[in-house]
Image: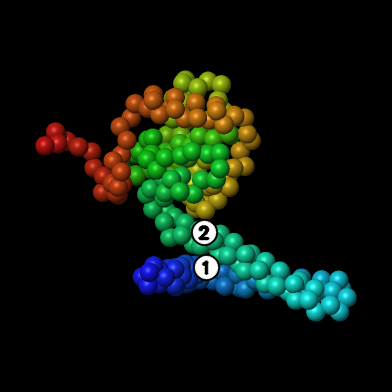
Amino acid sequence: MARTKKTPSTKEPGRLKQMWQVFQMTRRHDSTATWLILLGFLLPILVAVVLSLFLGNGNWFTISMFILAGVLGGILLALVILGRRAERAAYSQIEGQPGAVGAVLKSGLRRGWMGNEMPVAVNGKTQDAIYRAVGKGGVALISEGSPSRTKRMLDDEQRKVARILPNVPITQLSVGAEDGAIPLHRLPRSLKSIKKSLTKAEVHAVNNRLTSLQTQLPIPKGIDPMKARPQRGKVR
């Protein structure tokens, strides 16, 4: 019984320490995060104080309830801001690296979109890659690399998808720091902004059809694209 009682108390510091580590990581990569989080915490409290003065009618219980609600709202808003800025800071650490788009597609997609961390096309010399996501906006082909180099790869992949699914809209996106490309952290938002044209059932049907007809060999999970080399013989 003594051990079971100690379990909750040992878990709580772990969560707090984890949140503190996330905050430290975010602050190192985002100099404005601290001020935004502080503003998010204080703004609801300030609003609650003003409302309590006008609507409290001198009743201290009502005033204290307003302030308590403001504090809780401030904590919630600060955590939301921390989560968003931490996500952006995490993306900034992998931005520009091979496989970064795959990492976002695996864990950063919003509701209604499905993606895979494995590319559907790769240029072994330049490490440029094409990824695919399926959602209510249709099929999105996402290039990782210079838009000038990946344009042909995108067009080739679009023709393949169009032959299989002629009535499904296809959108091309380029991720990078060059003109005409979108930053990595804006990829989920860009996918979400695509006009919806498919139902949930149609999304699963399209994704299953593309998966079943995929003819290219996938890159083994965990491989480093920077170290990938074409095989010149049989693997023993």
From the image, which quarter does the C terminus lie in?
top left
Name the one closer to the observer, 115 or 172: 115
Task: Name the residue rendered at 58%, 34% in the picture.
Answer: 137
Name the one closer to the observer, 146 or 222: 222
Side of 208 where 80 appears, left or right = right
Which of marks 1 and 2 precedes in the sequence?
A: 1
Task: Name the residue rendered at 82%, 71% in the picture.
Answer: 51
Say what amino acid the circle numbered 1 marks: Asp
Q: Are marks 2 and 1 in contact (CB under 8 Å)?
A: yes
Residue 73 x, y percent position in the rendering: 67, 66
Q: Circle 1 is placed at which residue position? A: 30
Residue 142: mark: none
Q: Circle 2 is placed at which residue position? A: 88
Say what amino acid the circle numbered 2 marks: Arg
Distance between mark 2 and mark 1 Cα atoms: 9 Å
Q: Is residue 161 above or below residue 22?
A: above
Task: Name the residue rendered at 56%, 39% in the picture.
Answer: 112
Q: Is residue 93 above or below residue 137?
A: below
